[in-house]
Image (cartoon, rainbow, N blue to C red):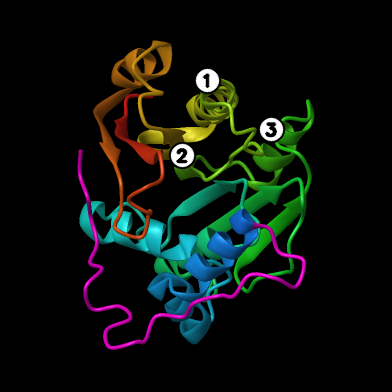
Amino acid sequence: MSRPGERDKLGGGRLKVRVKTGKGRTVSQKQWLERQLNDPYVHEARKLGYRSRAAFKLSEIDDKYRFLKPGALVIDLGAAPGGWSQVAAARVKSVEGKGQVIAIDMHGMDSLPGVVVFHKDFLDNDAPQLLIDAMGGRKADCVISDMAAHATGHRQTDHIQIMALAETAHDFARQVLKPGGTFLAKVLRGGTEGDLLKQLKLDFTKVMHVKPMASRDDSAELFVLAMGFRG
């Protein structure tokens, strides 16, 4: 499994912030807030104007594998709040009119330069055709998916839910990718040893798990990267 990216240079020399209990916070809320306040990726995202720390996950993966190329057409599934779309737009140069980024999310998000945004659940029956129509007859170079269901705290249930999303994203990618295209999707550790991984290996020439440095060590989050779509 690949671990692209660098962590050491972020947040060097910063003093650790500790959050006091009280003010109606539960212990878990205190721990979450403390982690956010001390997360160097959160601070760096704010400094660079990214909408989420997740932007660094995509940046680190693409820095190593170079699939977001100028002029490319990218479909971003589960895009809100927009961190991945920001990175994709910058790298394919959609603001300059060279590439194109089409994003969709059930929660919606504010507009972004160089990104066509749809406020819609990707699982709706008419959502795939909506995206295909927006592509204007082109095939996609990349389908990227950071979709995740709300965590239940039950590991097996969370696995099932996120794998269902990844499989749905893969089915869509097979419809819209051009030969040689790339598919990137969030999964959970241990979650792609079944049918999805087998199918990806049939559809793509190169399939691997990646966990960027911006993905927390204690998180079960992984990404499956499939390159070289056979068409």
Above or below for 205 versus 150: above
Specify the quadrant of the image occupied by residue 225: top left
Residue beneath the point at 62% across and 74% down: 113
In the image, is residue 6 part of the stretch drawn in magenta? Answer: yes
Answer left or right for 190 relative to 65: right
Q: Earlier in the sequence, mark 3 or mark 1?
A: 3
Q: Nearer the viewer, mark 2 or mark 1?
A: 1
Q: Which residue is mark 2?
A: 186
Is 46 in front, or is 91? 46
Above or below for 123 versus 20: above
The residue type indicated by label 2 comes to Lys
Highlighted range, magenta = 1-26
Q: Residues within 10 Å of mark 2 (few under 14, many from 20)?
A: many
Q: Which residue is mark 1?
A: 156
Inspect this view and state whether residue 90 appears.
yes
Q: Nearer the viewer, mark 2 or mark 3?
A: 2
The residue type indicated by label 1 comes to Gln
Q: Residues within 10 Å of mark 3 (few under 14, many from 20)?
A: some
How far across and down, in percent of the image, does residue 153 sit? 59, 33
Residue beneath the point at 56% across and 57% down: 101
How far across and down, in percent of the image, does residue 222 sit? 37, 40
Per the rendering, the mark at residue 27 is none
Callout 2: helix, strand or loop? strand
Is 124 in front, or is 11? 11
Image quarter where the N terminus lies is top left
